């Protein structure tokens, strides 16, 4: 079957899913879509830009807190508040990314982690605004979107549009310039590409879409917590992208699917063992399957080209 | 004063982390987990050993040894396979270790907080400048220069220390000169793990031994190592004291921003001197 056929089949299957599946599975699918978007946004940096961020939870959290605060503190309805998610996340990504893209390799990862910890600490400590450890509760979508099926369709639409936008970005001249920066920053500079600006723009785009994922999750979850910005959260898109394969655009989506299903299967039986399981999988994937599971199915090998050195 | 003690624990953890990075080029995110395992081993050892004055000191010796063994198993079983790989993959692998070790500790010791009694001789407090000060902290503060001195002697006055310093400068050349670099990696990793274990074992009587302590100490040690310079011994020492003091005084003076301040300093250091205050830039 041609590719368009598969895609069409997938769309139809997702569209009719609410008719066949109980609400629990719709929620699972909603979560998969959100995590998939988060990981795909993250992978714009890792897979296409060769930059590995260890602090993407910061942008997810900014995207979750900004609309949640607007709803809670300013009384805005959800649909008006949600656009604040990508805006806040992009603003944060621009501010931090300006410094982060100046570094390379391990230091890039470490500075992104440091900024994410700052975001976490600010959220955690600023009790008056963010509620601190208690988070913000009762952040629900309007009645029309409150049922699992309605919110599922809403998420699917937003995630679908976001993925389309990301796909267009990856296939645009900018996307190809970004790949050249990943492959060889020095040569990219020689042919007239402003390496740092491309990296920063990619960082901001990636942050913005991570924010969309955060915003969708806030209203799905009905509450937001400082954990959203904690460093363990930053590893979620990394692990998901790694599981799915980072060299393909759809790898992280497949990874999100596998990750969430696995989490559900394992946590249902032995909730305590889930981190053990996840950690072991990560270790095994790195040692045995450097190309991710999609790589196992014949994808291109993941080139060990770390973050660009300008 | 308690800031200096905190700085001491931090120093032990971060010097091990820094050492491991200097030689093997792996940023060991599981180093906080080693610290945690050291503290939990201390809990068990103090319980198991007979209730004698020497028990505490034996436990203080055995706990780091246990952590050293754990480090050895991890180095030989896992890290050896990935030294040639992308540094970021190594980072992710050690993150996987955090999850695995964290769960294993939960399974072995349960979810409740534990505490380790201070040895009877050091249970009281002494007066320092008229202020009551727990005797145990005096011990920690007394040990600090001793440990630092011992490490300095190891690094600068033994052949093994010379090899380690050589490895931080140029590993390939060292290998070409006929040194068994693979064995050196293992030794360094084991040694660094033992230091983290010692830090955890020493800290155990001063804190609640709990499951979250791996992440807490990791983030702080990470800041210490980055500020001091990855791979720099003196840098870790100075920056550990600095961070320890900053943390205790910061909490008194401006509680809300002390941790933000810590990370802000780290971010500034990373931007201005990514290799740290006393580190060496990578070529």
Image (spheres, rainbow, N blue to C red):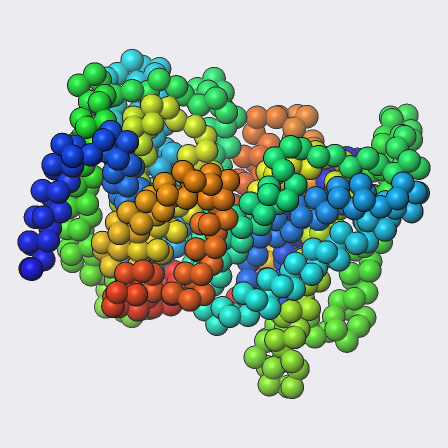
Decide if residue A152 is on the left or right side of residue B47.
left
In the depicted view, which residue is nearer to us: A90 or A127?
Answer: A127
Q: State left or right for residue B30 relative to residue A2.
A: right
**Drawn side of residue A62 relative to residue B165, left or right:** left
Q: Residue at x 39, y 19 (%)?
A: A137
Q: Position of residue B247 (x, y in %)?
A: 66, 35
Whether B66 is drawn above or below A141: the answer is below
Position of the C terminus of chain A, as image quadrant, is bottom left
The residue most toward the front is A269
Q: How many marks?
A: 0
Q: Nearer the viewer, residue B48 or A166?
A: B48
Residue at screen point 52% across, 56% down: B94
The front one of A261 and B166 is A261
**Residue A192 quadrant:** bottom left
Q: Residue at x 64, y 86 (%)?
A: B177
Residue B23 seen by the camera: yes
**Image quadrant containing the N terminus of chain A:** bottom left
Horizontal and vertical percent for residue B144?
81, 49
Based on the displayed image, in which of its 4 quarters is residue A157 positioned? top left
Tell me the quarter of the picture where residue A155 sits.
Answer: top left
Can residue B280 be seen here? The reply is no
Q: Residue placed at 26% from the left, 43% from the top?
A: A37
**Relative image position of residue A266 (x, y in whole percent):** 41, 44
Q: In the rendering, at what x and y percent does residue B86 appear?
A: 44, 66
């Amino acid at each position: 079957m041609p590719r368009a056929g598969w895609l069409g089949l997938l769309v139809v299957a997702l569209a009719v899913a609410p008719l066949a599946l109980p609400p629990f599975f719709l929620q699972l699918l909603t979560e998969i879509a959100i995590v998939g978007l988060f990981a795909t946004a993250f992978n714009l940096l890792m897979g296409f830009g060769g930059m590995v961020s260890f602090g993407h939870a910061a942008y997810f959290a900014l995207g979750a807190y900004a609309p949640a605060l607007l709803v809670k503190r300013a009384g805005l309805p959800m649909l008006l508040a949600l656009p604040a998610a990508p805006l806040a996340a992009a603003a944060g990504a621009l501010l931090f990314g300006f410094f982060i893209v100046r570094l390379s390799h391990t230091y890039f990862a470490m500075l992104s982690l440091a900024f994410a910890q700052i975001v976490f600490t600010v959220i955690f400590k600023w009790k008056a605004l963010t509620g601190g450890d208690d988070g913000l509760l009762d952040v629900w979508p309007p009645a029309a979107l409150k049922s699992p099926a309605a919110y599922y369709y809403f998420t699917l639409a937003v995630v679908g549009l976001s993925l389309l936008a990301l796909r267009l970005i990856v296939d645009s001249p900018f996307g190809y310039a970004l790949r050249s920066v990943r492959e060889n920053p020095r040569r990219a500079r020689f042919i007239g590409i402003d390496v740092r600006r491309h990296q920063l723009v990619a960082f901001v785009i990636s942050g913005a879409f991570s924010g969309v994922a955060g915003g969708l999750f806030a209203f799905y979850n009905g509450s937001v917590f400082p954990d959203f910005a904690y460093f363990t959260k930053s590893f979620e898109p990394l692990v998901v992208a790694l599981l799915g394969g980072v060299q393909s655009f759809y790898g992280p989506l497949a990874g999100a699917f596998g990750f969430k299903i696995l989490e559900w299967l394992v946590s249902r039986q032995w909730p305590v063992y889930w981190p053990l399981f996840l950690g072991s999988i990560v270790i095994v994937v790195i040692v045995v399957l450097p190309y991710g599971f999609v790589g196992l199915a014949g994808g291109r090998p993941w080139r060990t080209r770390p973050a660009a050195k300008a | 004063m308690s800031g200096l003690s905190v700085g001491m624990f931090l120093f032990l953890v971060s010097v091990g982390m820094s050492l491991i990075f200097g030689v093997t080029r792996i940023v060991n995110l599981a180093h906080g987990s080693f610290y945690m395992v050291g503290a939990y081993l201390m809990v068990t050892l103090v319980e198991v050993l007979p209730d004698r004055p020497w028990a505490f000191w034996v436990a203080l010796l055995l706990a780091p040894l246990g952590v050293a063994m754990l480090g050895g198993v991890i180095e030989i079983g896992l890290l050896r396979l990935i030294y040639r790989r992308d540094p970021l993959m190594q980072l992710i692998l050690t993150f996987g270790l955090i999850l695995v070790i964290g769960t294993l500790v939960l399974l072995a010791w349960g979810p409740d907080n534990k505490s380790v009694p201070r040895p009877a001789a050091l249970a009281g407090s002494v007066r320092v400048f008229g202020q009551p000060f727990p005797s145990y902290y005096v011990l920690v503060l007394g040990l600090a220069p001793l440990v630092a001195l011992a490490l300095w002697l190891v690094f600068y006055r033994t052949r093994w220390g010379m090899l380690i310093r050589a490895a931080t400068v140029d590993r390939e050349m060292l290998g070409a000169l006929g040194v068994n670099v693979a064995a050196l990696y293992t030794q360094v990793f084991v040694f660094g793990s033992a230091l983290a274990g010692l830090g955890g074992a020493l800290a155990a009587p001063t804190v609640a031994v709990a499951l979250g302590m791996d992440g807490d100490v990791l983030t702080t040690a990470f800041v210490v190592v980055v500020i001091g310079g990855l791979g720099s011994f003196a840098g870790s020492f100075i920056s550990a004291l600095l961070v320890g003091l900053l943390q205790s005084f910061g909490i008194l003076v401006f509680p809300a921003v002390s941790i933000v301040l810590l990370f802000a300093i780290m971010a500034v250091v990373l931007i201005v001197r990514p290799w740290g205050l006393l580190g060496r830039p990578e070529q």
